[in-house]
Image: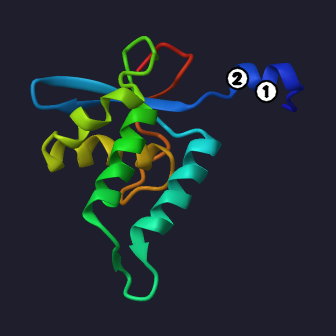
Amino acid sequence: MSFDKESFFSKVALKREEIEIEGGSVWVRELTALEAAEFQARSTQAIDIDTKKFASGKLLVDLSVYVVTCGAQTADGEPLFAKADADRLRALGAPLLEKIADAILSLSGIGKRQKKADSPATESADSGTA
């Protein structure tokens, strides 16, 4: 079936899933094309090209904070965090921040572990089902 413009934009949605964290769960969504490009640009600044090592720990943490700020959502699909929450996110334990960021990057096809396309917990942002 070939989409026209309106049916394309009404049917194609960002993937999202609910992930379990200590004490509860968080909804995450894949990054938009612009957010993913910004992540890629920021990640090149965080790695020293000559030594292949991280240029700074702060830049690495800031990458995770950027990803979590972009992709963490409420169950209703609203942003869970704002840019103003960056300092509080930086103060989280590294495993928790990385778990949330890795889930977002995985949905976006960027992370260490990409989710299988047929994962039953994955849903479209506008479908309302898990």
Of helix, strand and loop, which one carries label 1?
A: helix
Q: SS for tag 2?
A: helix
Left or right: where does residue 23 sit relative to residue 90?
Answer: left
* Structural distance between the alpha carbons of marks 2 and 1: 5 Å
Pick whichever, 51 or 18, lies toward us: 51
Task: Name the spot of residue 105 as percent of width and height, x first.
Answer: 43, 48
Identify the coloring: rainbow
Q: Tell which residue pokes out farthest to the left in this image.
A: 23
Q: 10 Å neighbourhood of mark 1: few (<14), some, or many (≥20)?
A: few
Q: Nearer the viewer, residue 58 or 18?
A: 58
* Location of residue 65 (image quadrant): top left
User: Quick check: marks 2 and 1 in contact, CB under 8 Å?
Assistant: yes
Say what amino acid the circle numbered 2 marks. Answer: Lys
Residue matched to label 2:
11
Q: Nearer the viewer, residue 108 or 130?
A: 108
Under mark 1, the amino acid is: Phe
* Above/below status of 85 relative to 64: above
Can I make out residue 31 in this image?
yes
Inspect this view and state whether residue 121 appears. no
Give the residue pinned by disc 1: 8
Judge from the rendering whether residue 101 lies leftward or rightward of residue 10; answer left or right. left
